[in-house]
Amino acid sequence: MERIIAPSVLSLDYSKMTEQIEQLNQSKAKWLHFDVMDGHFVPNITFGPDILKGFRKASPLFMDVHLMISDPEYYAPIFVKAGADMITFHVESFDNDTDKCLAFMQKMQDLHVQVGFTLRPATPIEPFEALLEQADMVLVMSVNPGFGGQSFMDDQLDKVRWLYKKREEKQLNYRIEIDGGINHETYKKACDAGCDTLVAGSYVFKNDIVSTIEGLLK
């Protein structure tokens, strides 16, 4: 599966926003990762749908929207209308109930948007095998959600390996994304374990954007 880099705009330097978005548009990145935090599900507050509309106007890249919020059922359609191409939700937002998760995934697909699911590092992946057939993507969090700049959690690669094995066994085509602590060393571990989609924040925006993204594709 083609490797995709999804720079996280959580780490973008907003004093150089126009310049950095232009660099992203000129780079080999195909997605933008857009972290939505509500100050409740995680102890931080980030972006609303109007900010997503601004990115949608400024960039042709695929908008990968990660909802770290308590009420995705209410807010997801608003973000779809604002320009999301992919909605990724946390299973914990639905009390880890697979039936509720599946119903939500169907609602998203009825809105003609791709849908992925994710979970906190402490939440095991195996109970959510029933979601794999409906998922366009599964996101493995290699840090605890809520803040950028954290260190990579190697033990989360076991989830990646499990997802890769299940994808092969079931002949499915969901993408395997990883988010958290991705840099010039950890990206190799993630790809070797089975990831094909890399979210990178601080590493991209604190270095030369174009060449750093190119390096993550090697």
Image (spheres, rainbow, N blue to C red):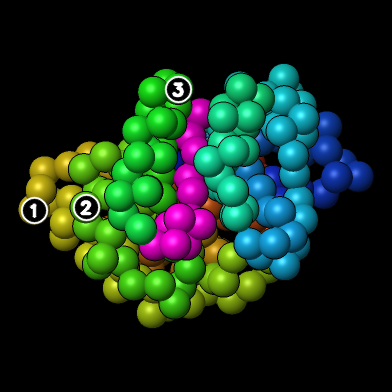
Kind of residue indicated by mark 3: Leu
Residue, disc 1: 169
Residue, disc 2: 130
Position in image of residue 116 (x %, y %)? 40, 44
Give the secondary structure at mark 1.
helix
Position in image of residue 55 (x %, y %)? 71, 29
Residue, disc 3: 111
In magenta, the rendered stretch is 83-96
Q: Is residue 178 magenta?
A: no
Task: Determine whether, in the image, residue 91 is placed left or right of residue 136.
Answer: right
Kind of residue indicated by mark 2: Ala
Q: Earlier in the sequence, mark 1 or mark 3?
A: 3
Give the secondary structure at mark 2.
helix
In this view, the residue in front, 116 or 197, is 116
Q: Is residue 106 above or below residue 201?
A: above
Q: Give yes or no for contact between labels 3 and 2 (Cβ–Cβ under 8 Å).
A: no
What residue is at 63 percent from the left and 29 percent from the top?
78
Q: Residue furthest right?
A: 15
